[in-house]
Each structure stands twice: as C-alpha cells, then as structure tokens.
Image (cartoon, rainbow, N blue to C red):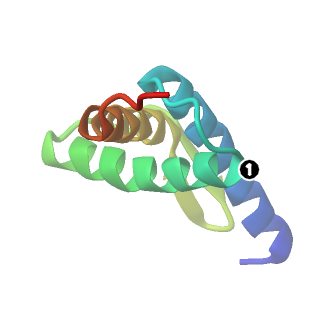
Amino acid sequence: MTLIELLLFLVVALICGSIARSLGGGTRGGCLTSLAVGFIGALLGGKLAQLLDLPEPFVVEVGGRGMPVVWSIIGGALFVAVLRLLGGRRSK
C-alpha cells in the first residue's frame, strides 16, 4: 500500500466515522476520534454483517483492500451509542 492509498483509506475512515458519530449522538472529540470510530465501526459492522449473512452494498477499494462503507457507518453509530449509554450523563 502506497502513501497515497493509505491517506485515501484514512479519509474514507474519517468520513465514515464522522457520519457514525453524528448518527450515534457523539459530539465530543475531533478528527482522530472520528478516525478511530470509522475503523472500529468497520470491524464491528463488518463482523455483524458477516454473522447475519448480509451483503456489503457499498465497498470502497483502495490499494487492494476494501472498506465496507455502509457497515462502517452502522457499526460506528452502534459503537458510539453504546459508549454514550455506558458513559451516562456528565454533570456540570
């Protein structure tokens, strides 16, 4: 994987993580948080789709590696929602 391919892969993960954070209700954090949510969402969503035998409707391939965009967003949103449920409310 070249440097350009790696950067494109990170941009896709960043976009997926940003969408997932907004859907899951997470507002704290910045670009690195969105990037982490994108990667964790890809792992969780991909595994969930595999366990339920669901198709991958939209996969972005960069450098011979694919990233399931739809399942990354769904997995990331579920991950953020669970973190918010476990974290509870913060008092000021």
Q: Is residue 27 left or right of residue 86?
A: right
Q: Residues within 10 Å of mark 1 (few under 14, many from 20)?
A: some
At x 42% / y 28%, what residue is drawn? Answer: 91
- Observer-nearest of 1 and 92: 92
SS under mark 1: helix
x and y percent of residue 38 in the render? 53, 48
Read off the residue under disc 1.
11
Q: Is residue 12 left or right of residue 78?
A: right
At x 52% / y 32%, what residue is drawn? Answer: 21
At x 62% / y 35%, what residue is drawn? Answer: 18
Location of residue 16 (image quadrant): top right
Q: Please identify the residue farthest to the right as the structure is shown.
A: 4
The number of numbered discs placed on residues in the rendered structure image is 1
x and y percent of residue 45 in the render? 34, 44
Give the residue type at disc 1.
Val
Image position of 4 with respect to 82: above or below = below
Q: Name the quadrant of the N terminus.
A: bottom right
Q: Please identify the residue farthest to the front as the structure is shown.
A: 92
x and y percent of residue 8 in the render? 77, 56
At x 14% / y 48%, what residue is drawn? Answer: 51
Q: Is residue 35 left or right of residue 66?
A: right
Q: Please identify the residue farthest to the left as the structure is shown.
A: 52
x and y percent of residue 71 in the render? 40, 38
